[in-house]
């Protein structure tokens, strides 16, 4: 989501109020708590009295909202003293607690009213809901449980979600996309295509890659290295644990807190690494580099571990074991722009190959107004921000400067891509870091033989290989292009008499490292073809009497149907050229 | 060490007694505790009174041993009642404790006497020490501290080590080998050649591979995969942690005990995996295989973690992070022999390439007499042992059946190789396992559609990649063959005027994936050559006036000296063919 769409965010926020107003009319003793705008709409959490709506009743609430909407001509806010606010919300302990929270923070209390409904609110609404919000641009979508303030120790409330977009068409498009997304669900496809598995004995959030899933991953990893190997990157390897001191020094111990997995041994305690950067700093530190050696570029696809809550885990996209295609560059401030340009060119090439480059945008995340929140001298920040921006311009990136979105250690470029069904994913990232070199006291000798501090550039192209593979499965709907397909060709003999010839063709493919599968089973011919189609195999080769007579095979494509009779060598060279071109 | 050399083991054990006798003559109030034979000799642990020998005094003890030896004509044992034994050793609390231990185990007490010295002992000595042990075949080597019964809670004793071999020549050869080994020490070479580093912030036993070390490791890994990829192996990936239940099911929780690293998260506890097998069992279990799919072969070079004591850690050979080139095959008993033959051929090819195949032997480790110690039916054991032996014969392996050395879950072939200075290393292993398939209830459907239990073959070719790399560094003394060398060629311009041409040659090599290093520094020419030699780079290319005039370069080899003037293309094709042949 382009973060600039303020009008839509205001409409969603307003609709949360409108839902609360409708709920109160239908369930008068309900206690509304909080109701924010979210990515695709809004929600509101309520404590219902004995009677509670079910999914069935959502339509009634929706109707009531549409009935109230025309009367919401405007929405006005006013600041009120604490006592007045407490009077308005007496009997609603949640709102009273929120009032106390606001007072404790020394902030002002504001109430917003539209129609007959007044809510405790910071503001940010449609100016004229009746005019600004089309009555068919929203709908209520589902009911869920939610704890007050997100804590399991608190009362469980009822959350009602709504979807809301600019127009009815946009709402329809979103719902179509979601239905399409469900069809492409990588958890289901991953099982059907035999790509990965989860085991209760191994644990949640820890997928195991089966041979076919690993075939895809190895192609992606090999391609990533292919894009890096002639650009001065050097592959390193670091262990998966380190002493806590490493992360205290780096600051990750404080930053990751209870997301860290703690490892205890007989004599020593360790941390399961949540990031690779501190390890790479240790490799850099074990050298005496001079300015002539800079930039130094380390590459390592490595697995890091984060203790996500088990309720949030699922498939490949929400995991505890995250294999990052990680890399760290150590360079001078004057080298940032050139290095970033190289990384941008890698990202562009990678995502073009993955058919994800058509629609994208880049957030040039820079410092916000409060400069005290960021580490490092103004001059270095300005140079780094300008280097990132110059690289964005030089590479004709569709970028947008987003103030306040920088990391505390430096500015960054975050790449957002849209998949085949229009969902946006934040994937690649390039980050300038003045923080870690300082914390680890890294330096190289400059022209005057003085110690000079390098800048660190963190970069990830695919981000997490697990998440990226989950996204790819859904993006391609399991129909991987030839070079990525876990099985590239199915060799299908028409009958028993053709098995020997089929075996020969299959063996030839295997010898040429084509991922071939021979279906020599006694399944009927039609069933074999259907199986190959269900498995989304890009090509299948059929071998029958006519083929053997012609010394050829019949080639069919998943995407383009029947291709015709070809010599095996012709098929092989077609495959090899398509694989080479990553088509 | 060939385990059959019983005579030498007996001599070493006898020499331990002889040392104790000599020590008691020189330090009469000493309390001897235990003194076994070990790999290269023997030791004895003592509690000395106030006065304790230093390294200097070892010669005196040695002399005394030689003086006593002629009087040790024979060595006789006798069984004695507990009371008599206690009388003999009164005043020596260690021996008294050992007597209690023997009684507790229900065993018999035996005393052995030679000359005037009697010791509590199980037996296993030279029949006639004076005749059987050459007086110049042993020497005392060093003094160390050692805790009684190996526990830090107990008294610290003084351990004196001795070296002992069949003859003076064998002893000399061992000492020469040890001196040579010191010169080749991989910890020093690893630092000098910039291969790996250890960081106190990361922790002991957790080496980080620097770019040059990783270059070697990637070559080894790629070669291993090359040897497997056309033999039906499929690459899988599994996370580094799993719930304890996985290891309780597999039996590793009990087997590894306090060598397991325990991982705690907010909600769940995990184990840092000590082995990959249980994970691979989970991948197999997530399929419905039929007999047509067997054998199923998984390949995964993966890092496992074991909590070795920090005092035992060092370099690459004693680590806590162990990357195994692991693989597990699931097959029918009838398929064991064929599969083992394939693995043997891989091992043979791999170790021939590594110049380690000239002298080797294989232990066919089978069950001992007490069959109750082993899991699985006699019939399966006999089939598996016979399959392993048939494979050994068919592959003309230099093997030896070693009863009692099987794993509790099945028989195995353990491969012992001798490195360039004659040290023996146990590296590759092939193990039959009837245990894990049972524990994980694995099965496939046989011809009658009944559930059939597969056998698991565990195999590792290099064993641990860290340890193997440590051994290789010492085996090659840092002078890696071209295909493995982290830097394959140094390009050295004679002077400033030749830098541009040298740069071109260097760039061409890089583009062809030759690991080239350009020395364009202002160091003198002679120094540059010396640096390249110190770095053990297999080839260096010199570019001077004459070379530029001839449109050529001068090639020199680390191992064969000056080669002469060649066209760059000729050099490149020479390199490419040597790399391909792994020479």
Image (cartoon, coloured by chain):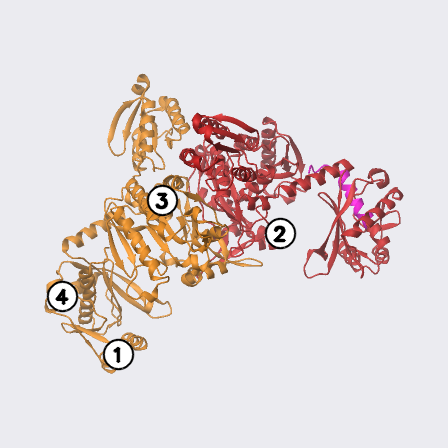
Chain colours: A red, B orange
Q: Earlier in the sequence, mark 1 or mark 4?
A: 1
- Horizontal and vertical percent position of residue B352: 28, 41
On whether residue A7 falls in the magenta region, the answer is: yes
The answer to the question of whether label 1 and label 4 lie on touching residues, with beta carbons closer than 8 A, is: no
- Judged from the image, the secondary structure of the residue bearing numbered disc 4 is helix
Badge 1 sits on which subunit?
B
Q: Is residue B25 left or right of residue A79?
A: left
User: Which chain contains the residue that carries disc 4?
Assistant: B
Judging by the rendered image, the residue that carries numbered circle 3 is B191
The residue lying at 86 percent from left, 58 percent from top is A87
Q: Quadrant of residue A512?
A: top left
Q: Are marks 1 and 2 on the same chain?
A: no
Residue nearest the observer in this picture, B301 or A525 = A525
Residues under labels 2 and 3: Cα distance? 45 Å
Q: Which residue is mark 4?
A: B129
Q: Which numbered tag is attached to residue A312? A: 2
Task: State which quarter of the image contains the N terminus of chain A.
Answer: top right
> Residue B190 sits in which quadrant?
top left
Q: Kindly identify which residue carries mark 1.
A: B91
Q: Nearer the viewer, mark 2 or mark 4?
A: 2
């Amino acid at each position: 989501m382009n973060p600039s769409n303020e009008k839509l965010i205001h409409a969603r926020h307003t609709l949360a109020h409108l839902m609360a107003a409708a709920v109160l009319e239908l369930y008068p003793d309900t206690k509304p708590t909080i109701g924010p705008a979210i990515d695709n709409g809004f929600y509101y959490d309520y404590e219902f009295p004995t009677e509670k709506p079910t999914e069935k009743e959502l339509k009634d609430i929706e109707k009531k909202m549409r009935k109230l909407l025309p009367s919401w001509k405007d929405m006005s806010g006013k600041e009120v003293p604490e006592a007045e606010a407490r009077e308005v919300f007496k009997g609603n302990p949640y709102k009273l607690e929120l009032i106390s929270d606001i007072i404790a923070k020394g902030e002002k209390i504001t109430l917003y009213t539209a129609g007959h409904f007044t809510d405790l609110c910071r503001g940010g609404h449609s100016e004229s809901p009746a005019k600004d919000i089309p009555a068919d641009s929203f709908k209520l979508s589902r009911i869920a449980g939610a704890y007050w303030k997100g804590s399991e120790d608190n009362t469980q409330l009822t959350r009602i979600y709504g979807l809301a977009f600019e127009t009815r068409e946009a709402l329809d498009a979103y719902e179509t996309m979601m239905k399409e997304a469900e069809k492409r669900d990588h958890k289901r496809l991953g099982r059907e295509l035999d790509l990965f598995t989860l085991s209760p004995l191994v644990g949640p959030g820890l997928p195991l890659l089966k041979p076919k899933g690993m075939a895809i991953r190895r192609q992606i990893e090999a391609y990533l290295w292919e894009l890096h190997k002639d650009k001065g990157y050097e592959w390193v390897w670091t262990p998966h644990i380190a002493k806590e001191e490493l992360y205290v020094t780096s600051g990750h111990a404080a930053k990751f807190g209870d997301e860290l997995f703690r490892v205890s041994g007989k004599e020593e305690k360790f941390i399961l690494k949540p990031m690779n950067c501190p390890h790479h700093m240790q490799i850099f530190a074990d050298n005496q580099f001079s300015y002539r050696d800079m930039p130094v570029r380390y590459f390592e696809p490595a697995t890091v571990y984060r203790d996500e809550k088990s309720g949030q885990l699922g498939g490949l996209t929400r995991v505890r074991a995250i294999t990052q295609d990680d890399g760290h560059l150590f360079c001078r401030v004057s080298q940032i722009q050139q290095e970033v340009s190289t990384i941008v060119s890698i990202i562009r090439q990678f995502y073009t190959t993955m058919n994800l480059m058509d629609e994208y945008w880049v957030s040039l995340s820079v410092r916000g107004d409060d400069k005290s929140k960021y580490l490092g001298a103004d001059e270095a920040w300005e140079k780094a921000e300008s280097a990132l921006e110059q690289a964005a311009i030089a590479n004709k990136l569709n970028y947008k400067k987003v103030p306040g979105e920088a990391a505390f250690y430096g500015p960054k470029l975050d790449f957002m891509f849209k998949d085949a069904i229009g969902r946006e994913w934040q994937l690649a990232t390039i980050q300038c870091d003045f923080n870690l070199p300082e914390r680890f006291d890294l330096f190289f000798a400059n022209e005057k033989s003085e110690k000079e501090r390098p800048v660190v550039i963190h970069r990830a192209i695919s981000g997490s290989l697990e998440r990226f593979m989950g996204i790819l499965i859904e993006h391609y709907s399991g129909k991987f292009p030839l070079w990525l397909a876990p099985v590239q060709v199915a060799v299908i003999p028409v009958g028993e008499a053709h098995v020997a010839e089929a075996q020969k063709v299959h063996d030839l493919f295997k010898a040429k490292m084509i991922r071939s599968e021979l279906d020599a089973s006694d399944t009927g011919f039609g069933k074999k073809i259907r199986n190959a189609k269900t498995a989304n195999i890009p090509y299948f080769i059929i071998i029958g009497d006519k083929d053997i007579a012609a010394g050829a095979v019949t080639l069919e494509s998943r995407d383009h149907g029947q291709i015709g009779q070809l010599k095996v060598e012709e098929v092989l060279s077609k495959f090899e050229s398509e694989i080479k071109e990553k088509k």
